[in-house]
Amino acid sequence: MIRREITGFSNPTVKFLRSLREKKHRKAAGKFLAEGLRLLTDARESGHIPEILVMAKGRDNHALLAALEADVVAAGGEVIETSDDILSKITGKDNPQAVAGVFAEFDTSLGALDRGKAKIWLVAQALRDPGNLGTMLRTGDAIGAGGLILLDDCADPFSVEAVRASMGAVFTQRVAQARWDEFEPWLRAGAGQLVAASLREAQPYRGAPYAAPCFVMVGNESRGLPEEYEMACDLRVTMPMKGRADSLNAAVAAAVLGYEVLASVG
Amino acid sequence: MIRREITGFSNPTVKFLRSLREKKHRKAAGKFLAEGLRLLTDARESGHIPEILVMAKGRDNHALLAALEADVVAAGGEVIETSDDILSKITGKDNPQAVAGVFAEFDTSLGALDRGKAKIWLVAQALRDPGNLGTMLRTGDAIGAGGLILLDDCADPFSVEAVRASMGAVFTQRVAQARWDEFEPWLRAGAGQLVAASLREAQPYRGAPYAAPCFVMVGNESRGLPEEYEMACDLRVTMPMKGRADSLNAAVAAAVLGYEVLASVG
């Protein structure tokens, strides 16, 4: 067991933890940061124990935190106590939660997905907002999806913002990252219906003939899906748009459509 | 017509425009800022012309911008040309869009709402995230809602983030702000069904007996709705939660429920 207290801002471990707020450092280390007892407890209950647990010295005692600490110790991880100030520096928040954890990034290769494990999968193309990405993971958990497939250049699912917005679903949902040129052959090599919210030759989303495993795809926040991707879909559906706007927020579109698919194939 | 060029960072108008990024200054002035040609065009098409229009000197010519400029001039507003650097300072963004506008804040009193104008109204309690707030406005536009009623201490609907996330819907949806103690008597003084997503004595959200005008209420991102508010509802409904989490993102919950209500009462 490694357990120690860090009091200096310039400590290399503090610098390392702080560096995980940036994507290039996450990729270099293959690690990511999750903050807050609730998130870490969700992780633990999903079988994910942090490699490093950082706790504020002046934290309140809490049974869940004690259980987490014991699991980290049992797994050979490191427990670090530090000041609120240093924790603020690590998390980049003025009022950090009293605990943060470092996890190894998960395997996000498409080949690691078992499509038969769920009736619904969410797919996002060029999603740029980490909050939208995390929200889609959270919605995926709610609708019993197997995970989220990120096509082309999306936000990083392991960013602090995405992890936070996922409300723990980053630990329960599978995440895969792929280019379209890799995804389409993979999809067509097995069972799977690709569905997109679209305005092109689309039918009403309610009561459309959804079939499991159903891959529900939404596009970039500004540009939507490329036409080629929409035309490759088995089903294009449209949600009513009663007002001036012609689109929904990407995470909202995924949720409205995802719940409709759940009602049909769930 | 007032038309001028501003070249100095310390110009009082630049300071005023910049100050509108902060709530206290927005409230003091009764004005708010909207950025980008798309948003300003949405505003214009909804009958809202900015009192001040700020444009980057090096902008591309654009017919929509010319039309906007003409409308501002016709309405006796002010047109300001300035540098990209100063526009960055005003908007707080490194790559500002080439145009921004200042609008008078709208009347957000509950008494100004005409509930008979729409079959659906969205209601949010203690919503803290301006992105969620803007997303709810955008969803409201899509489902043909009349507007968004903000209960208790919510994020400011006129913040730059909320306006941006609304994708123009802040100009088409009515916004009201009220305390619960004011809202409940107002609601009960006329027709209206209050519906909440809830886990308390709730029925499945699909096919529940929704009735117009239907007020769809969601709660704070962390705490949800106070029990008192839920129990005051005419209908409590629940969405399936197949995973570990027990709640959806607030804007997602409003959208899933809102679309279900639309299918029933639309």
Image (cartoon, coloured by chain):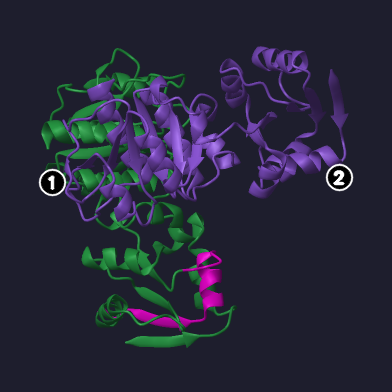
Chain colours: A purple, B green
Comparing A184 with B51, the one in front is A184
The quarter in which the N terminus of chain A is drawn is top right
Q: Amino acid at mark 1?
A: Lys
The quadrant where residue A94 appears: top right
Q: Which residue is mark 2?
A: A10
Q: Position of residue A174 (x, y in %)?
A: 49, 29
Residue appearing at x 67%, y 30% in the figure? A103
Residue B124 appears anywhere in the view: no
> Pointer 1: residues within 10 angstroms few (<14), some, or many (20+)?
few
Which label lies toward us, 1 or 2? 2
Q: Secondary structure at mark 2?
A: loop
The reply to whether the C-beta atoms of the residues labelled 1 and 2 are less than 8 Å apart is: no
Residue closest to the eye, A159 or B235: A159
Mark 2 Cα shell of 10 Å, populated few (<14), some (14-19), many (≥20): few
Tell whether position B94 is magenta: yes
Q: Can residue A64 be seen from the camera position used here? A: yes
- Rendered location of residue B100, percent (x, y): 41, 70
Mark 2 belongs to chain = A
Q: Is residue A102 left or right of residue B181?
A: right
Q: What's the amino acid at mark 2?
A: Ser
Relative to A153, is B57 above or below?
A: below
Q: Which residue is mark 1?
A: B117
Q: Give the magenta part as a residue range.
A: B75-96
Please report the residue visible at 37 percent of the width from the left and 20 percent of the height from the top. B241
**Residue B208 lies in the magenta stretch:** no
The residue closer to the viewer here, A205 or A192, is: A192
Q: Is residue A157 above or below residue B41?
A: above
Q: Residue at x 82, y 37 (%)?
A: A13
Residue B53: name its quadrant.
Answer: bottom left
Does residue A118 appear to the left or right of A51 in the view shown? left
> Looking at the figure, which quarter contains the C terminus of chain A?
top left
